[in-house]
Amino acid sequence: TERTLVLVKPDGVRRGLSGEILRRVEAKGYTLVAVELRTAGDDVLAAHYAEHEGKPFYAPLVDFMKSGAVLAVVAEGHRVIEGFRSLAGTTDPTTAAPGTIRGDLGRDWGLKVQQNLVHGSDSAESAAREIALWFPAL
Ligand code: ATP
């Protein structure tokens, strides 16, 4: 059965939305396999966001991701990768559909990086890579 990496980003943890976000993942019917609150370091973030290196929002993104605790989660279930991306909504929280995590709980704060509450792996290859990165023991 499929697994995905979900991150509740520092804005979500800071705003006290970790429980609400986990609740939505569980309510959809997915199983939580691992949940860990931690402060991400440069090494993990550089690997996690390697595809964005060189983009204008890369440095603000890494700084933002280091600005507070992140809740790292592995969720499991048939088609969970696609299912969580659907729960999360589109990247820009201003226009993400109501009913989604970003659409219901997020907004644009006028900052250099979009603070959009969550990350979810976007493919089976990304999920395998990201789970190995954040949870090497799994
Ligand atoms: P994630 O990978 O975090 O699930 P995503 O797939 O919707 O989100 P990506 O394109 O992978 O978005 O970008 C990673 C993160 O970088 C986004 O979630 C957002 O926080 C930030 N970001 C992406 N594009 C921009 C942008 N144009 N301006 C500011 N921040 C951005």
Image: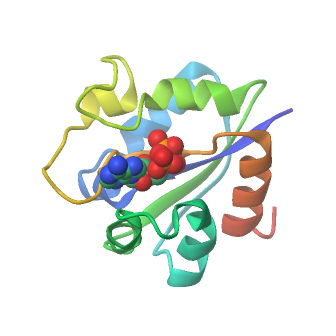
In-front residue for pair 79/36: 79
Residue 36 against residue 116 in the figure, above or below: below
- Residue 20, horizontal then vertical, whole percent: 37, 36
Q: Residue furthest right?
A: 1
In-front residue for pair 103/39: 103
Tag count = 0
> Going 51% across and 52% down the picture, which residue do you hit?
7
- Residue 106, horizontal then vertical, whole percent: 25, 37
> Going 62% across and 24% down the picture, which residue do you hit?
83
- Residue 33, horizontal then vertical, whole percent: 71, 47
Residue 11 against residue 92 in the figure, above or below: below
- Residue 31, horizontal then vertical, whole percent: 68, 34
Horizontally, residue 33 falls left or right of residue 49, namely right
Horizontally, residue 82 falls left or right of residue 100, namely right
Horizontally, residue 76 falls left or right of residue 56, namely right
Residue 65 against residue 117 in the figure, above or below: below
Is residue 75 among what the camera can see? yes
In-front residue for pair 84/125: 125
| Residue 136, quarter of the rendered image | bottom right
> Going 23% across and 31% down the picture, which residue do you hit?
94
Horizontally, residue 95 falls left or right of residue 49, namely left
In-front residue for pair 49/106: 49
> Going 69% across and 58% down the picture, which residue do you hit?
130
